[in-house]
């Protein structure tokens, strides 16, 4: 019998800007995430989350992309 949790498996990755100047650049992070998604090939993106951690300098931004390896619906 298949474990029912196996039916809900999703892949994911997290992306941030490099630490230092420009770390809080939202547009740069969006471009990095878009490039990473494009490099995955034909996948279905299920969700994207955005978090911002306040630091002593620029905010530390992170985006997490959840996806399925099935081709995207058209």
Image (spheres, helix red, strand yellow):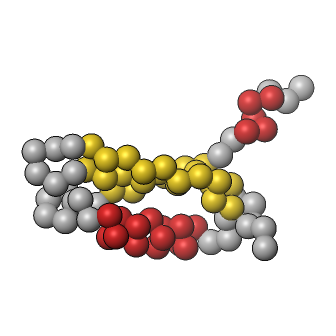
Q: Is residue 9 above or below residue 16?
A: above
Among the 4 quarters of the image, the one containing residue 58: bottom left
Question: Relative to the observer, which residue lies in front, 67 or 40?
Answer: 67
Q: Is residue 49 left or right of residue 1?
A: left
Quarter in which the N terminus is drawn? top right
Residue shown at 78%/68% (left/top)?
73
Q: Is residue 19 left or right of residue 46?
A: left
Question: Relative to the observer, which residue lies in front, 74 or 71?
Answer: 74
Residue 14 seen by the camera:
no
Residue 67 seen by the camera:
yes
Question: Relative to the observer, which residue lies in front, 36 or 51?
Answer: 51
Q: Position of residue 36 (x, y in %)?
A: 48, 67
Residue shown at 48%/70% (left/top)?
34
Among the 4 quarters of the image, the one containing residue 67: bottom right
Q: Position of residue 28 (x, y in %)?
A: 32, 70
Q: Position of residue 63 (x, y in %)?
A: 42, 53
Residue shown at 27%/43% (left/top)?
53
Q: Is residue 23 above or below residue 11?
A: below
Q: Is residue 65 left or right of residue 51?
A: right
Question: Relative to the observer, which residue lies in front, 6 or 72?
Answer: 72
User: Which residue of the protein is positioned furthest toward the right in this rendering?
Assistant: 1
């Amino acid at each position: 019998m298949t474990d029912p949790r196996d039916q809900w498996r999703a892949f994911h990755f997290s992306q941030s800007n490099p630490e230092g100047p420009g770390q809080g650049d939202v547009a740069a992070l969006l471009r990095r995430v878009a490039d990473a998604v494009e490099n995955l090939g034909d996948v279905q993106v299920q969700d994207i989350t955005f978090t911002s951690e306040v630091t002593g300098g620029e905010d530390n931004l992170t985006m997490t992309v959840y996806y399925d390896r099935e081709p995207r619906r058209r």
